[in-house]
Amino acid sequence: MKIGIANDHAAVEMKREISDYLTSKGYEVVNFGTDTNESCDYPIYGEKVSKAVVNKEVDLGIAICGTGVGISLACNKVKGIRCCVCSEPYSAQMSKRHNNTNVLAFGARVVGIEMAKMIVDAWLDTEFEGGRHQRRVDLIMDIEKEA
Ligand code: RB5
């Protein structure tokens, strides 16, 4: 599976560690983030990884900034993206199971690396349940068509 990963300057180290972790687990990782600590604008990187997901260049995306909030907002502006910020594994797991999230966000200034790994594992190891949740996800995506 191919995972796109994006980050701003607040999350360079976290991106590296998560990329290495995913690679060690056999995932192919594509880097859409910045690699320097120079201040930059997180929407640019959220858009890049989200467009890669929508265009099927990667299967799923991970977006990291200081809080995870700004970059997740940017990701959700790309049509077809369902992204949420998760600071613990339960929300990450349920966001895939019930909401079929295709981008996972978290904050490098909020969670430590071991918690981040647990969040990523919970998300990647969970499948969308479909059924009544598909109807609800469809209703979310319909809002995009109206906007
Ligand atoms: C950058 O200082 C910070 O604002 C950014 O990483 C993120 O937390 C925004 O939501």
Image: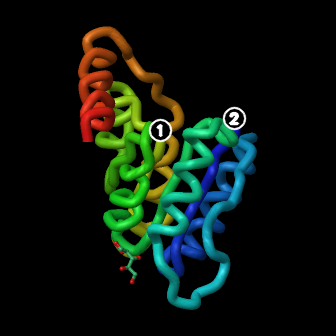
Residue on which disc 1 sits = 102
Q: Is residue 1 left or right of residue 115?
A: right
Q: Position of residue 67 (x, y in %)?
A: 34, 70
Q: Which mark is residue 112?
A: none
Label 1: how many residues lie within 10 Å, few (<14), some (14-19) or many (20+)? many
Nearest the viewer among 86 and 36 is 36
Q: Is residue 95 left or right of residue 42?
A: left
Task: Name the mark nearer the viewer: 1 or 2.
Answer: 1
The N terminus sits in image quarter: top right
Quarter of image, res 12: bottom right
Nearest the viewer among 62 and 144 is 144
Looking at marks 1 and 2 on the same chain, the residue that comes earlier in the sequence is marked by 2
- 32 to 103, vertically: above or below: below
Residue drawn at x 38%, y 46% as measured from the top left: 83
Residue drawn at x 71%, y 53% as measured from the top left: 30
Residue drawn at x 33%, y 17% as measured from the top left: 134
The C terminus sits in image quarter: top left
Quarter of image, res 139: top left
Nearest the viewer among 47 and 15 is 47
The residue type indicated by label 1 comes to Asn
Nearest the viewer among 77 and 24 is 77
Label 2: how many residues lie within 10 Å, few (<14), some (14-19) or many (20+)? few
Residue drawn at x 66%, y 58% as measured from the top left: 19
Q: Secondary structure at mark 1?
A: loop
